[in-house]
Amino acid sequence: MNRLEQMIKELCPNGVEYKKLGDIATYSKNRISSQNVDEKSYVGVDNLLPDRGGKTISNCVPEEGNLTCFDVGDILIGNIRPYLKKIWLADVKGGTNGDVLVIHIAASGIAPKYLYYALSSDKFFLYNMKYAKGAKMPRGDKEAIMKYEIPIPPIEIQEEVVTLLDDYTIKNAELCNSLEQELTARKKQYEYYRDMLLDFGTVHGGGTSECEWRTLGEIAIDIFRGSGIKREQVTETGIPCVRYGEIYTQYNTWFEKCVSHTKLEYVPSPKYFEYGDVLFAITGESVEDIAKSIVYLGDEKCLAGGDIVVLKHNQNPRYMAHVLLTTHARQQKSRGKIKSKVVHSNVPSIKEIEIPLPPLETQEKIADILDRFERLCNDMALGLPAEIEARKKQYEYYRDKLLSFKEQ
């Protein structure tokens, strides 16, 4: 029998009382002018992180007008989707906006962090989601939230639960951080190895008997822009297609199947890509990511959406996929121009990108090596997030178990 079980046996052998949140706490109704709140004591819903761990926020400019006050020990809960799961135990005094509920403990014998953990549970989140009101942007129902029932064991047990969860939270965070660092290190190792293998010991613009530098415009059989496919025109079946945003979110180096389809009737001027073609996304959110490229290795004839440039060539497709992801190639792609807060590239810019081109036999050997290396990294990239997610679920199970008590 562990210490917590022993305490429960001694202090509440017949169970504990469950109380409504409204019986032990109230909403903060005090207001303060934003002029009296600096950026270090202001909390907006965007900055209300579930893993803040007591750290105060900074560089967050207060909204103008009157704000809701919060004090040390108050619990702040996001009150608008997608922030309903965000929660923080305040360690400073400050103010917040109308998208955050401030819960103030009004009864004695309640440990603030115990209540914080109780309201961090999936059980409360699902309850809050169930009663949220509103169609476009649902908000938590204040009246329903105050009716949520929480087990209230003796204060000694509350403090022991907090001690156990604090310790487990720290260990779990350290493990997840270690796994994430390992994943980052592996990715950097792969990128370094890929860049080294595709350097050929040449200087930009130079060449050897084994390798020469050529622009994409020089090796292109054809290069053209795709034709727009709107989100609402994506269907479950039909002609396979790729929209430019999917190049950033759905695909990696090369792919064989499209995740989206559309109907030919939706595309007045269809632009097709086929096996071996390179696809560039020429619209993006950052200079670093602009003109991300992928190569298609499937058998079907597919449609290219708008803001995609298709490059047809007679080089090894898998080699092209890897060489266009090197640091040198990405630096050339980043010559895009910012317009209306969005970064753009174009066909002339794509044509100017220079890459090393060894003989086709060498291209295939390099592609085979990099495919194997990337597969190893991807296996780890899939495995580590799964491990991190498993640890997260393990923590949530442990937390919810510690907060479950027999009711009187």
Image: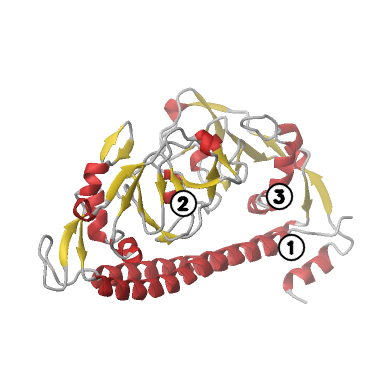
Question: Residue sitting at 26 percent across and 67 percent down?
Answer: 195
Cβ atoms under marks 1 and 3 closer than 8 Å: no
176 and 44: which is toward the camera: 176
Task: State if disc 2 and disc 1 touch (CB < 8 Å).
Answer: no
Residue 266 visible, this angle: yes
User: Of tags 1 and 2, which is closer to the observer?
Assistant: 2
Which residue is painted at 33% across and 34% down in the image? 341
Describe the element under mark 1 as helix, strand or loop: helix
Mark before the other along the chain sequence, 1 or 2? 2
Lateral position of residue 201 relative to residue 242, left or right: left
Residue 68 appears in which quarter of the rendering?
top right
Instruction: Please tell me whether mark 3 sits on a helix, a strand or a loop.
Output: loop
Q: Are marks 2 and 3 in contact (CB under 8 Å)?
A: no
Q: Which residue is mark 1?
A: 401
- Per the image, the residue denoted by label 2 is 301
Checking the image for residue 110, the label placed there is: 3
Q: Amino acid at mark 3?
A: Ile
- Which kind of residue does numbered mark 2 sit on? Lys
Q: Where is residue 222 drawn, in percent x and y?
A: 28, 48
The residue located at (68%, 50%) in the rendering is 115
Relative side of 404 to 46, left or right: right
Measured as percent of width and height from the top left, residue 327 is found at 26, 60
* Mark 1 or 3, closer to the camera: 1
